[in-house]
Structures are given as structure tokens and as C-alpha cells.
Image (cartoon, rainbow, N blue to C red):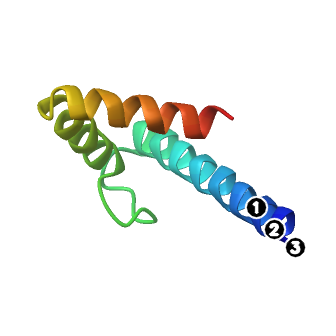
Amino acid sequence: MLSNVTGWIKGLTEAGIGLVALAVVVQVIFGSSAAFLPGDVIARLAGMVSSLGASGLVGLITAGLLYRIFSK
């Protein structure tokens, strides 16, 4: 049962990452005023990256943990 739940979580995570990547590509092609995107995806991602960078060592550790989680 636990492996079934883990499989669902992995599938949803991969789908979410795929949707974010698709949103970035669409925004690069059509610009930030694309009617079918709810906001500025690239600006949100850049904000998250800059907040991790501003956090110093904690941000670096968090980025490393996120990389490790998503690279499995």
C-alpha cells in the first residue's frame, strides 16, 4: 500500500515539474502576457532562486536537498 502511495506522489511530482517546464517554454515563446498562463512563471522562479541565494548557507543546503529529491 505504501509503495502505491509513493508511486502516486512520484507521478504527481513528475507531472508538476513537466507543467512548470512547459509554462516556462510557453512564456519564453509568447511572453509574459500569454492569456492562458495565470501569472509570470519566470519571475516567480527567479524570485525563488534569489530568495534561496539571499539565505546563504541555509539556501544552499535547501537547494541541495531539493536537487537530491528531484533527481531520484
* Chain-order first, disc 3 or disc 1: 3
- Choose between 2 and 72: the one closer to the eye: 2
Identify the element where label 2 is drawn: helix
Q: Report, in whole angstroms, how far the alpha carbon at label 2 lies from the one at label 3.
A: 4 Å
* Residue receiving disc 2: 2
Identify the element where label 1 is drawn: helix
Q: Tell me whether circle 2 and circle 3 mark residues in contact (CB < 8 Å).
A: yes
19 sits to left or right of 55: right
- Choose between 59 and 17: the one closer to the eye: 59
Q: Position of residue 14 (x, y in %)?
A: 67, 50
Q: Position of residue 47 (x, y in %)?
A: 21, 43
**Which residue is located at x 57 percent, y 46 percent?**
22
18 sits to left or right of 49: right
* Residue receiving disc 3: 1
Q: Tell me whether circle 1 and circle 2 mark residues in contact (CB < 8 Å).
A: yes
Q: Position of residue 62 (x, y in %)?
A: 35, 37
27 relative to 55, above or below: below
- Looking at the rendered structure, the kind of residue marked 1 is Thr
Figure disc tally: 3
- Looking at the rendered structure, the kind of residue marked 2 is Leu
